[in-house]
Amino acid sequence: QVQLVESGGGLVQAGGSLRLSCAASGRTFSSFAMGWFRQAPGKEREFVAAISAAGGTYYKDSVKGRFTTSRDGAKNRVYLQMNSLKPEDTAVYYCAARATSYSGRYYTQDYEYTYWGQGTQVTVSS
């Protein structure tokens, strides 16, 4: 079993920055691919960013150049650095994880992930 706990959400003005953190425990973090998703009120959950076990990354087009995901194996944590935030980035952000035998592969669909955190609210005011 893997437990994921997100932190770092909050209220920020447009143009500001936040860094989300996801702490993983319970299994071998290094063999897990990680992902970030978000869900805005009245909308479906959507993919934001993914990072493979080897550290390769992939982003939703609308966040490219503004968001960066990274992982720290020593701390069993994955991060989502969000810069130049926009009101449309307002959502609950979720961290997700799945075991993988392919260290270079990342996953962009929510059904591909096994474990989920509880979510953290990000609100961007205009």
Image (spheres, grey):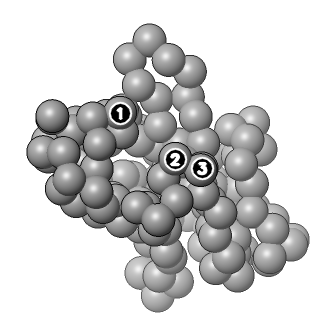
Measuring 64% from the left and 79% from the top, which residue is drawn there? 55
Q: Residue at x 69, y 70 (%)?
A: 52
| Distance in Å between CA atoms under marks 2 and 1 | 10 Å
Q: Which residue is mark 3?
A: 60
Q: Position of residue 113 (x, y in %)?
A: 70, 46
Q: Amino acid at mark 1?
A: Glu
Q: 120 or 89, which is in the foreground?
A: 89
Measured from the top left, where is residue 107 in percent x and y?
A: 74, 54
Q: Given contact means CB atoms under 8 Å apart, are the residues at marks 3 and 1 in contact? A: no
Which of marks 1 and 3 precedes in the sequence?
3
Residue 18 visible, this orientation: no
**Left or right, 46 with reference to 17:** right
Q: Residues within 10 Å of mark 2 (few under 14, many from 20)?
A: few
Image location of residue 103, percent across then percent down: 79, 77
Q: Mark 2 is on which residue type? A: Ser
Considering the numbered disc 1 on the image, is that residue within a helix, a strand or a loop?
A: helix
State yes or no: discs 2 and 1 in contact (Cβ < 8 Å).
Answer: yes
Separation of residues labelled 3 and 1 (CA atoms): 14 Å
Q: Amino acid at mark 3?
A: Lys
* Residue 62: mark in rendering: 2
Distance (Cα) linking label 2 and label 3: 6 Å
